[in-house]
Image: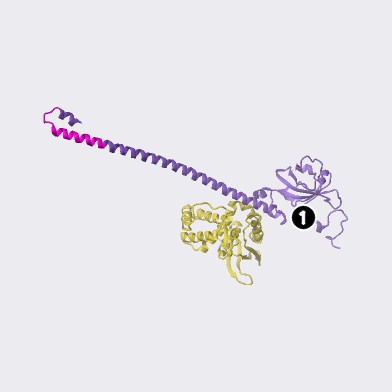
Amino acid sequence: VFGSGLIGRDGRQGRFDVYGLINKAVEGMVRSKFGDAAWHRIRDAAGLPDEPFVSMEQSPDKVTYDLNAAASAELGISPEAVYEAFGEYWTTYTAEAGYGELMRSAGKTLPEFLRNLDLLHTRVKMSFPHLVPPSFTVTDETADSLVLHYYSSRQGLAPLVVGLLRGLGDRFGVAVTVSQERVDHPTPHEVYHLSWKPKSQMPGS
Amino acid sequence: MSEAAAPNSSGSRRRPELAVLQELFPFYFSMLPSGAIVEVGDRWAGLAPEVAAGAGFFVVFELDRPSGLTDVAKFASRPHDIFLFRLKSRPEYWIRGQFIPGGKVSDSSALLFAGGPWLTRLKDLQTLGLELRDFPPHDTRGDMLVVLQTHESNAADLRSLALRLREELKLQKSLQGQLRQIQKMELVGRFAGGMAHNFNNILMAIHGYAALALMRLTPGDPLREWIQRG
């Protein structure tokens, strides 16, 4: 889930860098869902060389933005939808990238996991020194719903969190319903109203 | 007076003290100089239930370092050493920590063990039935596992880059070989072309002089046949 947070700041005003792990995951998502040829076209359209991404190597956030724009054009979906698909993919990718145990340790249920998101990001920050992680808090919790508050210094990643929540729903075997709103006061942040049902209770299951 | 704040008449820890100890060192245990374990942290139950009050240190553990210590009473003389020992039931994992003298309220000669399992891979947690949450926030072992995992991911990246580099070098070498072959063939072709051109020039001269000779010879001259054969 730390996908939305693997973005570092390099000290220059307003400039962020993205850890290669994120771009690797974008590549993984495109290759697994749309094939290698689609990835080559997207990479070429984004003006990137045919070189592998390195997890700990930082690159300007423009690389990720360009990839998002190229993927949107190639796949014929909106940039927001690309972020959402990426967020959904991220939860499975982290396990493949060796962080499955970290995810497992964050909780056995969706609400438990979401309550531990901040701690998860703190642990990840120890490994990614330039990481500027987002902050998550949970409020208004009931047996099958909660409100998740997402504070980030980055703009435009709100759809990614929607995808992450759906991916987490799959991980914990629940169907998630999410609605999102932007709150500007007192601190600007995104608010996600989340409810879930066990997938076994869904029609057709 | 509440139970929690009750004086320690039985020699056991008072509840607040125990709670703090459990919170800080969930894998603690205290033992007597005889090696008899008298008190254990609550996480041992999940990791190794044989580590319980009444068990003997050398019955459940095998000391690795410091080496040569066979008497628990002598552990007290090494308060600044890192102790590494293995669970006999799970010898593939180390327990790491230190022994602090005065580890039990009623017995100042007792030793308190502060430490816990020493892991180097995140996936070992699951093998041992542990979770990151089993390590308290002050304990950096959980974060160290994440750092090590990141380094492992980096090493995997480097392995993948090295593999790709090797493949590209191999391809480059093969292309260079092909290029050299093409250049060689081109050279042979050019040489053959030059040879053919020179040979053609000579032939042209022979044909020319033969034609001139034929024009000079009379129709019945026997030399005509020889020239025409050529």
Q: Which residues are magenta?
A: B200-222
| Residue type indicated by callout 1 | Gln
Residue B74: x and y in percent read: 82, 43
Q: Secondary structure at mark 1?
A: helix
According to the rendering, which colour does chain B have?
A: purple
Work out whether B139 lies above or below B230: below
Q: How far from the left and from the top, in percent, is residue B158? A: 57, 48
Is residue B212 in the magenta section? yes
In the rendered view, does B43 fall on the left or right side of A161? Answer: right
For the residue pair B37 and A119, the one nearer the viewer reads as: A119
Please name the residue that numbered disc 1 is placed on.
B22
* Magenta stretch prevailing secondary structure: helix
Q: Which residue is nearer to you in this view: B8 or A20? A: A20
| Quadrant location of the C terminus of chain B in the rendered image | top left
Percent coordinates x, y for residue A131 in the rendering? 62, 59
Q: Colour of chain A?
A: yellow
Residue A180 within the segment the image draws in magenta: no
- Lateral position of residue A186 relative to residue B198, left or right: right
Instruction: Say whether residue A168 is visible.
Output: no
Q: Circle 1 marks a residue in which chain? A: B
| Above or below, comparing residue B189 to residue B130 in the picture | above
Residue A151 image offset from top left, x and y in percent: 62, 65
